Amino acid sequence: MKSLQTNSLHKEQGSIGILFIYLHVCLFNHPSPNFNQYVRTQGAVTDQLSRRQVRVYQLYSRTSGKHVQIQGKRVTATAEDGNIYARLFVETDTFGSRVRIRGAESGRYLCMNRKGKLVGKPNGRSRDCIFTEIVLENNYTAFQNAKYEGWYVAFTRKGRPIKASRTRENQREVHFIKRLHKGPPPFPNTDQTKHFDINFLLTGYYISFMQIFDIV
């Protein structure tokens, strides 16, 4: 009787051991969810369900020292701070970092044709009007076209568009700073005020704070 009980106990222990090994194999060999891959996949798909966010700012070109403007089909980086054509509506296309850029005054979208030329289009639904917003290590922002991978928005020192096929992420010509659009003066009697415009770079955003002191 004792021998039968011992054999039964050994069988139970053996079954438990096999079950443990099976569970161990299932647990560690099962592929874990790849969140980064999920983000990349979803970021490449236009989001038709979520409410799109719209941000309003200017894009300051590192090379030209001026702002991007969309005037009809023409796109340049020659606008002064506060120029009406430099005011841009940046619409999110996905839950990630893809955006559409539209001129607030012209109503035209920033797009890139197959030759790598920047143009303004009245309709921004096509993929050549979608850009991936990339925040670089130096806190500048680059805009890579969604249709033509490796092609970036870029301008010369004179503010002329550069052919996108000649661009790279590490070039100064593709670097931009997001800057709030310069609004109207806060007080009507601006002749009696002195302004000190203090600009600083913070996590890729160029924010302008105005300190105002009365002149006696």
Image (tube, helix red, strand yellow):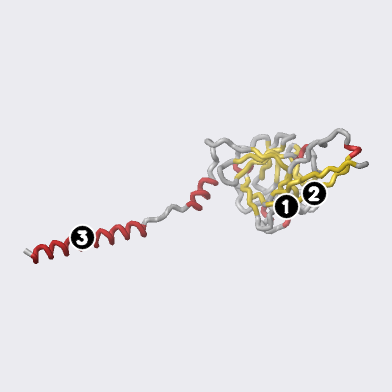
Name the foreground residue: 47 vs 210.
Answer: 210
Inter-mark Cα distance, 2 to 1:
10 Å
Question: Which image quadrant is residue 127 in?
Answer: top right
| Image quadrant containing the N terminus | bottom left
The three-letter amino acid code for the residue at tag 1 is Leu
The three-letter amino acid code for the residue at tag 2 is Ile
* Element assignment for label 1: strand
Name the foreground residue: 82 vs 175.
Answer: 82
Name the foreground residue: 66 vs 50.
Answer: 50
Q: Is residue 95 visible?
A: yes
Specify whether 18 is left or right of 67. Answer: left
The three-letter amino acid code for the residue at tag 3 is Ser
Q: Which mark is residue 54?
A: none
Mark 2 or 1: the one toward you: 2
Identity of the residue furthest to the left in this view? 1
* Element assignment for label 3: helix
Identity of the residue furthest to the front in this view? 216
Give me the residue at 64% from left, 41% from top. 100
Q: Which mark is residue 198?
A: 2
Query: Which circle's residue, 2 or 3, is located before the other in the chain?
Result: 3
Residue 215, horizontal then vertical, whole percent: 91, 42
Query: Which circle's residue, 1 or 3, is located before the other in the chain?
Result: 3
Q: Within 10 angstroms of label 1, few (less than 14), some, or many (20 or more) residues?
A: some
| Image quadrant containing the C terminus | top right
- Mark 3, residue position: 15
- Mark 1, residue position: 201
Residue 206, horizontal then vertical, whole percent: 73, 48
Q: Is residue 9 above or below residue 192?
A: below
Inter-mark Cα distance, 1 to 3:
65 Å
